[in-house]
């Protein structure tokens, strides 16, 4: 009976944390919808991190509603074969195909569902390593709610907790695939640990299953896992003369090889993935990372001097140090390797707080309460900034007339017709319509730099009539969106190439034209 009551209390606690953090994460999106100015059109999100990516994922949901599970890029007007990517979002589209819901709304709902998975997997993971219930609860709160000192230095300095997606759990709460990927990584590492410690092959098998599934979301996490297992495996071998963790490493390497042989190779060959693979994103400066951990950082340092240095503490020390170091490798995607590093950081901070309280004879509960309160300022700061952001932020609101053109394209024309527009408008269109765009995402649109030059050259009126006609045919363009941003690029009163177009919708500040070419 007591065990049932305990389980019930834990369930209620995790559920309460979920409700609270989801209100912080999605509340601003709802508030901006309710408080939409009359002269504005709301795009469905007021995101802190990368709204252009939210539009992309929402467009994939829309694709899933109309087509299959194999993804075909809506940010490319060319005809390309489907690839096994972003399947979580195409599946979301399939599940909600019969519901009259906006793609961006489905994205938010899917994020809430994914956060439930992440929360309960995280709680299970913490039960493996933290035996005291109060510490588990404090750790869960810190994982989902805490941040660093970014709020204190913004906007003069962009600390990692508010400037780098994936540094804390904030991004995982916003993006479903981030939450699922992190949950699978924790499940894999947790099962690997249990399998070695308790000598259960079946548990190792399940760890391998979770890890392999994680590769479909973030294959580069294999490098993080490899470093963790390799370094800790070496420590384990020195201590016990056992190769068990190094054998787990070999299992992981084998799974990565299988993934790249049967899946990754085709993805890398796809023009859709070319921009993602070739990206070169740098990690934040060391000081910005330290500021990103904020008050947790001195507690993490204290954990290095803990007198209770068991195997579990060494595991998280190795994870933290090794995981941080590889974020500075010159591999192009090193910035993405920070995902999941918040887990050892928080667990070490809890251990460090215990050590400080013991040595200085402070009240441990009071110290942890202060850490939770102070470190939560980052989450509240981002929420309040999103609510207070200017209505002139065009990633949140377009003009009402621009929105009316978006709504027109949602209900008129054929699916997958190509639209030419400025970068921001083109980024938004596939999230809300069934149309494709020539350029709308720097990573997902193939040859983005070349296409940017072509789009700007057209809107600036630098193309001759023959070049314009050839461009429309090559780019497979059906519609041209002509609004405030396109006029800003052009500096022209009339849309270039109008002799090849007919007016479909014309308003005071925005027009939509349809291309009329022979043979098209």
Image (cartoon, grey):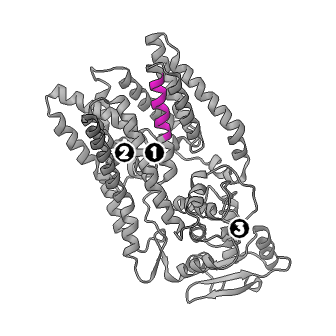
Looking at the rendering, the stretch of residues picked out in magenta corresponds to: 184-195
Q: Position of residue 26 (x, y in %)?
A: 39, 61
Residue visible at 49% across and 80% down in the picture: 399
151 relative to 418 in the view: left or right: left
Which numbered circle lies on residue 454?
A: 3
Q: Quadrant of the N terminus?
A: top left
Quarter of image, res 494 = bottom right
Residue visible at 36% across and 75% down in the picture: 35
Q: CA distance from mark 1 to mark 3?
A: 32 Å
> Which residue is tagged 1?
284
**Vertical arrangement, residue 513 with respect to residue 157, above or below:** below
Which numbered circle lies on residue 292?
A: 2
Residue visible at 46% across and 47% down in the picture: 166
Mark 1 or 3, nearer chain start: 1
Could you tell me what secondary structure mostly forms the magenta stretch? helix
Quarter of image, res 222 = top right
**Vertical arrangement, residue 249 with respect to residue 481, above or below:** above
Mark 2 or 1, nearer chain start: 1
């Amino acid at each position: 009976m007591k065990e049932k009551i305990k389980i019930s209390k834990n369930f209620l606690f995790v559920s309460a944390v979920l409700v609270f953090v989801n209100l912080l994460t999605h509340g601003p999106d709802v508030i901006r919808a309710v408080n939409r100015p009359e002269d504005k059109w709301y795009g469905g999100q007021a995101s802190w991190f990368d709204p252009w990516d939210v539009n992309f994922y929402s467009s994939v949901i829309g694709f899933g509603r109309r087509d299959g599970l194999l993804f075909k890029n809506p940010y490319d007007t060319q005809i390309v074969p489907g690839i096994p990517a972003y399947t979580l979002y195409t599946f979301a589209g399939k599940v909600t195909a019969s519901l009259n819901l906006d793609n961006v709304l489905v994205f938010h709902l899917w994020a809430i569902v994914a956060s439930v998975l992440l929360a309960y997997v995280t709680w299970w993971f913490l039960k493996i390593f933290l035996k005291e219930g109060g510490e588990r609860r404090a750790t869960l709160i810190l994982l989902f709610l805490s941040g660093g000192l970014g709020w204190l230095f913004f906007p003069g300095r962009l600390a990692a907790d508010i400037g780098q997606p994936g540094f804390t759990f904030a991004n995982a709460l916003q993006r479903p695939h981030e939450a699922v990927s992190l949950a699978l990584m924790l499940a894999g590492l947790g099962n690997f640990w249990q399998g070695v410690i308790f000598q259960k092959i079946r548990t190792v098998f399940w760890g391998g299953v979770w890890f392999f599934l994680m590769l479909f979301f973030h294959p580069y996490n294999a490098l993080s896992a490899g470093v963790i297992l390799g370094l800790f495996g070496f420590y384990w071998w020195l201590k016990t003369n056992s190769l068990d963790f190094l054998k787990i490493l070999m299992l992981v390497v084998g799974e990565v090889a299988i993934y790249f042989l049967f899946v990754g190779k085709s993805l890398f060959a796809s023009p859709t993935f070319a921009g993602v693979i070739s990206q070169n994103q740098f990690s934040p400066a060391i000081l910005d990372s330290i500021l990103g951990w904020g008050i947790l950082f001195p507690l993490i340092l204290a954990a290095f001097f803990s007198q209770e240095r068991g195997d579990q503490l060494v595991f998280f020390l190795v994870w933290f140090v090794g995981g941080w170091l590889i974020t500075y490798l010159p591999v192009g995607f090193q910035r993405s390797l920070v995902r999941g590093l918040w887990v050892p950081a928080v667990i070490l901070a809890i251990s460090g707080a215990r050590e400080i309280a013991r040595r200085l004879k402070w009240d441990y509960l009071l110290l942890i309460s202060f850490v939770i309160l102070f470190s939560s300022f980052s989450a509240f700061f981002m929420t309040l900034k999103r609510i207070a952001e200017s209505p002139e932020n065009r990633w949140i609101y377009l003009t009402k007339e621009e929105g009316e053109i978006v709504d027109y394209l949602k209900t008129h024309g054929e699916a997958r017709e190509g639209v030419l527009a400025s970068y921001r408008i083109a980024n938004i269109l596939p999230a809300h319509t069934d149309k494709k765009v020539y350029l709308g995402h720097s990573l997902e649109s193939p040859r983005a730099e070349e296409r940017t030059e072509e789009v700007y050259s057209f809107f600036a009126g630098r193309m001759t009539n023959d070049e314009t006609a050839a461009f429309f045919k090559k780019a497979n363009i059906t519609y041209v969106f002509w609004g405030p941003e396109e006029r800003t690029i052009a500096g022209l009163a009339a849309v270039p190439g109008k002799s090849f177009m007919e007016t479909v919708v014309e308003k005071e500040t925005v027009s939509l034209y349809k291309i009329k070419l022979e043979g098209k």
